[in-house]
Image (cartoon, rainbow, N blue to C red):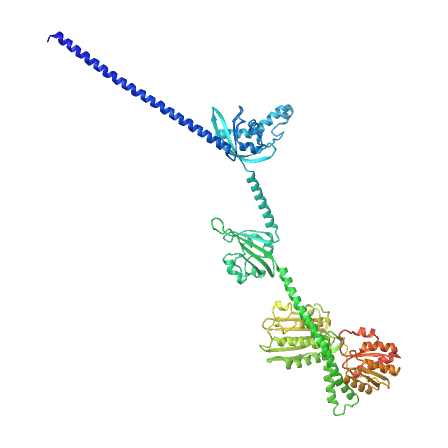
Amino acid sequence: MNSVALAFLVGTITLIAACVAGYILLLRQARQHSLRVLYERGKLKNEREARVLAETALVLKDRLYRILFAHTTDMVFMYGLTEDGLPGHFTEVNVVACETLGYSRDKLLKLSPLEIQTADTPSAITGYTRSELVTLSDDEIMDRETAFAVRPVRQLVERILAEGHAEYTSTFLTHDGDHIPVEIYSHAFELEGKSMIISTAHDVSEREKAKRDLQESERRFEEFFSHSPVGVALYDGTGKLLNVNQACLKTFGAPDTEQFAQFDPFANPFIPERMRRVLEQRDTAQFEMSIDFDKARTDGLYVTSRRGAGHLDVLMLNLGMDREYAPRGYLLQVQDITSRIQTKEALQRSGRQLQQAQKMEALGTLAGGIAHDFNNILTPILGYTEIMLHGMDDTEPNVEFLKEIHKASYRAKDLVQQILMFSRQHEHENKPVHLIPIVKEVVKLQQSSVPDGVKVSCIIKTDQDVVISNPTQIHQVMMNLCTNAGYTMKESGGEIEVHVADFVIGTRAQSEFPDLEPGRYLRIRVKDTGCGMDVATLERIFEPFFTTKPSGEGTGMGLAVVHGIIVGLKGALTVTSVLGEGTTFHVVLPVVEQQATEDASDTQDLHAGSGRSVLFVDDETAVAQMAVKMLRALGYAPALACDGEEALTMLRQSPGAYDLVVTDLSMPGISGRELAKAVTELQPDLPVILCTGYSQQYTEAEALRDGFADIIQKPIVMRQLADAIAAAIDRAG
């Protein structure tokens, strides 16, 4: 093959190869372009889908925002800022804002935050110099004050923009002029290149009202707590004192809270035994508690200014559990019921005293009745004895026996007088008497009546024993003191020593008896070796109705009567005692220089009757017959009537036959009182003598007013009868 052909073939092959290579290149480029177009198309599709999704999300967010904006319970405001950095008009508000502030939406959108918020009015002259006040115009002053007023708002806006948000409180002014306290949360954001602020305002009126109500409640509670007359103390769950009011401090006598905190209300020795376990378990309990404040102070429980015993009404209230089931605490309420308890005890004592007084009254009535009957029995004994002695010489054999009967009768007569004094039907007249014989007689009686194992002794160291007194009263005093002394030793035995001595009260001794005048006195000391008395008992032994004896063994009147008798005699009664060692009573009476009154029957002759006629009236036959014989022995011509009606009959039948009438008081039919009035009407100049042994309601003064010439007490004593009749006849003429 020639070279030309070969070259052509090579060129053709080369051209074909080039064409194939170019075609392959074009195919590759076309494929790459197609892939690029597909990629871009897919990218655009993705972008479109993303944009659609974004727009949908934006619509949803906008719708959600609208829903939240419209339906939130708080007020929502959105506003921009003015050129000078202050809040501008609202650009958006929600329905709640319109309804709360009382504006329509259109009107509210024309306002700014400055127009719905209240602010303090600045002072008109604060911050101005004197020259500025002179040179500045009113407009300039107004502009400056406005700038001063909005300065806090400007600072707040700057803080919101700088920090992005802020929380603060303010007060909104409604369309009607009401003020609404609010809490505001403001958030800053950008909208179309402008700074915007959206604020959420929460109405806190109810909360503020609740807060004020709580504060008012706390204030009232504090006032009640502080000024309550009831003592109140608060304790926490562990029993620690939190607070205590003045009434509680006063009730316990504590000077301050610190001292009161030392007192444990849950465990102290004054809690009643039945309540101890309840308080130990910290349960609610109400009880009465008696506190010995002296013991509380001496035992170091706490410092108290109160003395003696007090009675408290206590309520310990468990306040329950909190949310964590821990004890909330305890409330102590306490009232001082000491006065109420004392009043109750006083009423009980008064009731007992009334019962005792009624018992004493009944006993007095009984004693008076017994005295009346005993007088009627004793009158013939004493009367016949005196009649026999009146007609006998001292040398006759039976005179000594009759004198002993006469002496015993007089002692019985004195006993009747003592019974009458007990029944308060008779009062004794004090006179000079010798005390030593009375003391010896009482000691002799006590020696046979004291309990076994008790010895009674008497020591007399004076013969100056005349005092102004009454034998019966002195006898009563000595019997009471000796009987009480014997009672204290009835179980253990011991000794009663009665010591009588005279002494002079001068400068030294007057300190022992400050109520007595200086002078000569007689001291009777009654000392025993019994159980003695404590200080509390010593302070009350002379109180009426106070007794240490068991119920039914003592009236509580003995020492009170003794004290009254001694004081009435211008003397003094003192007592010393040591518990477990014995007691000593000191009776001090003033001594007189005059002689004691002797029985007149031994020194004077009896008045003779000279045959005068005497009408004796008595319903007791034995008394009447004895009186007739006594009158006949005295030389009178006696006549006898057994009652008032018979006496009036005799007086009417024989006018002027009688020189005197002696009548009993209590008789069947016409009484002695009625008889005396009838006699006065029949024969005004005829004297009437009352002879009685018992008169419960008829006094001596009343008898004299009724026309009786004199009164003779039964049992009838011959000398008293003779003297009374003679005096009455002499007065009658």
440 vs 701, nearest the viewer: 701
* Residue at the farthest left position: 1
Tell me where residue 288 sits by quadrant. bottom right
487 vs 121, nearest the viewer: 121
Residue 53 as seen in the image, left or right of residue 642: left
Q: In the figure, 567 relative to 323: above or below?
A: below
Q: Position of residue 490 (x, y in %)?
A: 60, 77
Q: In the figure, 618 relative to 109: above or below?
A: below
Tell me where residue 357 sits by quadrant. bottom right
Q: In the figure, 322 relative to 49: above or below?
A: below
Q: Position of residue 202 (x, y in %)?
A: 53, 35
Residue 628 as seen in the image, left or right of residue 294: right
Q: Visible in this render: residue 362?
A: yes
| Tally of marks | 0
Q: Position of residue 670 (x, y in %)?
A: 81, 78
Give the quadrant of the N terminus.
top left
Q: Position of residue 69 (x, y in %)?
A: 50, 32
Residue at 82% from the left image edge and 74% from the top image edge: 704
Give the quadrant of the C terminus.
bottom right
388 vs 680, nearest the viewer: 680
Q: Visible in this render: residue 163?
A: no
351 vs 383, nearest the viewer: 351
